[in-house]
Image (cartoon, coloured by chain):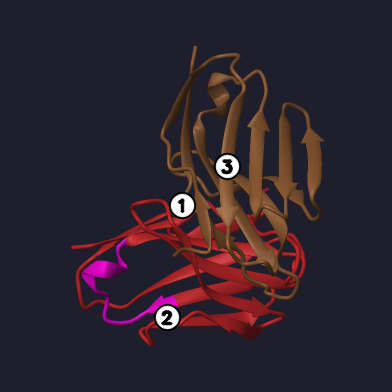
Amino acid sequence: QKEVEQDPGPLSVPEGAIVSLNCTYSNSAFQYFMWYRQYSRKGPELLMYTYSSGNKEDGRFTAQVDKSSKYISLFIRDSQPSDSATYLCAMRGANAGKSTFGDGTTLTVKP
Amino acid sequence: DTAVSQTPKYLVTQMGNDKSIKCEQNLGHDTMYWYKQDSKKFLKIMFSYNNKELIINETVPNRFSPKSPDKAHLNLHINSLELGDSAVYFCASSQDSVQPQHFGDGTRLSIL
């Protein structure tokens, strides 16, 4: 079983929709949680970085962490065609150094 | 200015050849990484260096040898390339080993 499982997608939504992207994990040592956005033929770009359980908001993006359920989510409000990309969750322990990534969810926002 | 830059962007070569990929970061970060992304988009760490010292080596075949001449550079040399080495290789850096990584745009390696 993988340490990090990400909803596989692909996901297709109309412009303006609220998008929910989700990951579950099994390693209780994970303490830092990240969401990356990856456009085609580009490297992953850091979107959100959180440490504790709860919500963190940045513009149209909200990252949610529930450590008790080992579940993280990324919400995108008022989705735009420019949000079309693959979204990767990542997480790591306090001293791990490396991050463990989910497999990615490909999102398409249709105008 | 590109923060993490890799060269070349594309590499097409034959099985059995030896090739190198170079990476440079201008962020002043102490830690650098090599990741491999397969066709299904799964990103897997290969190596990590902190201040030129190897700190992570994830059971990568000995044909892969990283080298860090200084903390701003991390190169990857691959000997005797195999078909299964075809992938996108990403370099990344972070301020230290606990901060999130910043990625380059990848080197697309195709083995014929």
Supply the letter of whichever chain is brown. A
SS of the residue under disc 3: strand
In the image, residue B64 lies at what x, y percent? 40, 81
Q: Colour of chain B?
A: red
Mark 2 Cα shell of 10 Å, populated few (<14), some (14-19), many (≥20): few
Q: Is residue B11 above or below residue A29?
A: above
Residue depicted at 43% across the width and 37% down the height: A9
Circles 2 and 3 on the same subunit: no
In the image, residue A13 lies at what x, y percent? 49, 20
Q: Quadrant of residue B28?
A: bottom right
Res A22 label: 3
Pointer 3 or 1: first along the chain: 3
On what subunit does the disc labeled 1 rest? A
Residue depicted at 80% across the width and 35% down the height: A57
Res A103 label: 1
Q: Nearer the viewer, mark 2 or mark 3?
A: 3
Kind of residue at badge 3:
Asn
**Residue A22, can we see it?**
yes
